[in-house]
Image (spheres, helix red, strand yellow):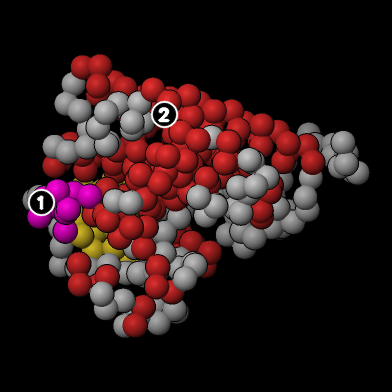
Amino acid sequence: MSDSAEYTPPKVWTWNKASGGRFANINRPIAGPTHEKELPVGRHPLQLYSQGTPNGVKVTVMLEELLAAGHGGAEYDAWLIRIGEGEQFGSGFVAVNPNSKIPALMDRSGATPVRVFESGAILVYLAEKFGAFLPTGGAARAECLSWLFWQMGSAPYLGGGFGHFYAYAPVKMEYPIDRFAMEVKRQLDVLDRRLAESEYIAGPDYTIADMAIWPWYGGLVKGWNYGAAEFLDVESYRNVQRWAEMIWERPAVKRGRMVNRTQGEPSGQLWERHDAGDFETKTQDKVSPAG
């Protein structure tokens, strides 16, 4: 064990210093808005407020897949919420998602606007609204929802656990990195065993379970998340590799991964999306980085 200083927790924890690390400036132990800022509203019924993190990509992939499948009512405006700058704590965003996490969706297609937050809830909402990518009943629906909720429960170990301590913590510590690397590899093994017997996660058909899991674990094996592919020996998970490549070949997935993305190659970034033409004429040519 290489961690040098042992920490003795106080009797009552208090927030009296910055946490350190990449996201120290936005971490806080209280909820609610920090400033007044209304959200923009575009011309489409579906208004998405997000950033191109794995959780955000789930929803933009879903919306692009719906459009590719001919569901014209799935046209949407995607507004960039810069989480590193604390825009998720604006009053307008908190009104849509009191948990201050991206993504958040407003559906204005009916007489009364409907807010939906948490990425898994948004996927289910859209799947039921358009009757697509979610089996309607029986064992197939149960299997799909089981894998969807598997992802919702497992991803914090990958992101907030392994990803934080491996890539973002101010000091590298052996114990948490080993602890969470072990769990992430167990999760990859769960997926690899499942994909040895099934073409897609929930069965023979492409569903919201794939859309939820791919941005996290597909991104991991493709080397996009945390740069930890070699460390975790992701090449040994052959079935996950096969599945990740198959999903990536879908044109709607390629488009969805671009939306609200602010990192990587400029050609792969589309800060805002208001119609399909924005993929050709990038929104970042019209919108400054400061908004």
Answer yes or no: is residue 164 visible: no
Looking at the picture, which amino acid does disc 1 mark? Gly
- Provide residue 41's location: percent of width, then percent of height: 23, 66
Q: Is mark 2 on a helix, strand or loop?
A: helix
Q: Mark 2 points at which residue?
A: 195
Looking at the picture, which amino acid does disc 2 mark? Leu
The image shows residue 2, relative to residue 187, as above or below, that is below
Q: Mark 1 points at which residue?
A: 70
Q: What element carries label 1?
A: loop
Question: Is 66 a magenta residue?
Answer: yes
The image shows residue 105, relative to residue 12, as above or below, that is below
Q: What segment is highlighted magenta in the picture?
A: 65-75
- Provide residue 289's location: percent of width, then percent of height: 44, 78
- Left or right of 176: which side holds 150? left
- Residue 151 picture quarter: top left
Question: Is 194 a magenta residue?
Answer: no
> Which labelled disc corresponds to residue 212?
none
- Left or right of 102: which side holds 96? left
In the current view of this chain or complex, which residue is farthest to the right? Answer: 4
The image shows residue 238, relative to residue 143, as above or below, that is below
Of pointers 1 and 2, the one earlier in the residue sequence: 1
Q: Give the quadrant of the C terminus.
A: bottom left
Viewer-nearest of discs 1 and 2: 2
| Residue beneath the point at 66% across and 31% down | 182
Magenta segment, principal secondary structure?
helix
The crowd level at tag 2 (other Cα within 10 Å; few <14, some 14-19, many 20+) is many
- Left or right of 265: which side holds 203? left
